[in-house]
Amino acid sequence: MPSGSPPSVGDRAPAFHLADQHGTKQRLSGHTGHKVLIFFYPKADTPGCTTQACGLRDVADDIGDTVIIGISPDAPAKLARFDEKYGLGFTLLSDEDHAVAEKYGVWVEKNMYGKKYMGVQRSAFLIDEAGKVEQAWPKISPKDTPTKLLAALDV
């Protein structure tokens, strides 16, 4: 069943409590006082997701104390391998039951080669210091994620 619509600019960002690539539970509220880029991606270590994650890794030194968090349906062990393989250095969260993707409106019906299935629509959200959506980029391309983030932060 597809999720609802994504949060809009000015909405409170949906909360989450998910395991990271090390098995440690993380909450969005743990980052209050910092901007947070949350990006949803379909599957770790696939070409588009690798392009997106590595692009964000490459701009991480340019975004000040903005926190980067990637969320996918992958298990923590797979996320740990993805992080280690590419030296990502930011939090990757496991949303195996896609409950958080549904809250953010990015669990959608997809169609590949005529086969319909449910999956994550690549999207990104910039959350402000108070936990509200500052920018929303539904259906963002992997290569545009870092450039949109830099533009939104005016760096």
Image: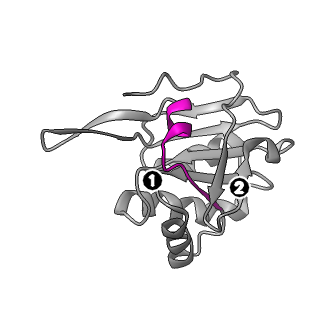
**Residue that appears at 12% across and 39% down:** 114
Q: Nearer the viewer, residue 127 or 148?
A: 127
Q: Bounds of the magenta span? A: 91-104
Q: Is residue 58 above or below residue 19?
A: below
**Relative to 45, is 127 above or below?**
above
Identity of the residue furthest to the bottom in this view: 85
Query: SS class of the residue under badge 2?
Result: strand
Residue 77: where, in percent of width, then height?
52, 69
Question: Tag 2: residue type?
Answer: Lys
Q: Is residue 100 magenta?
A: yes
Please give the residue where the numbered disc 1 appears in the rendered image: 143
Residue 71 locus on image (x, y percent): 55, 50
Provide residue 142's location: percent of width, then percent of height: 44, 51
User: What residue did someone put label 2 on?
Assistant: 25
Q: Earlier in the sequence, mark 2 or mark 1?
A: 2
**Residue at (38, 57) in percent of width and height:** 48
Q: Nearer the viewer, residue 97 or 122?
A: 97
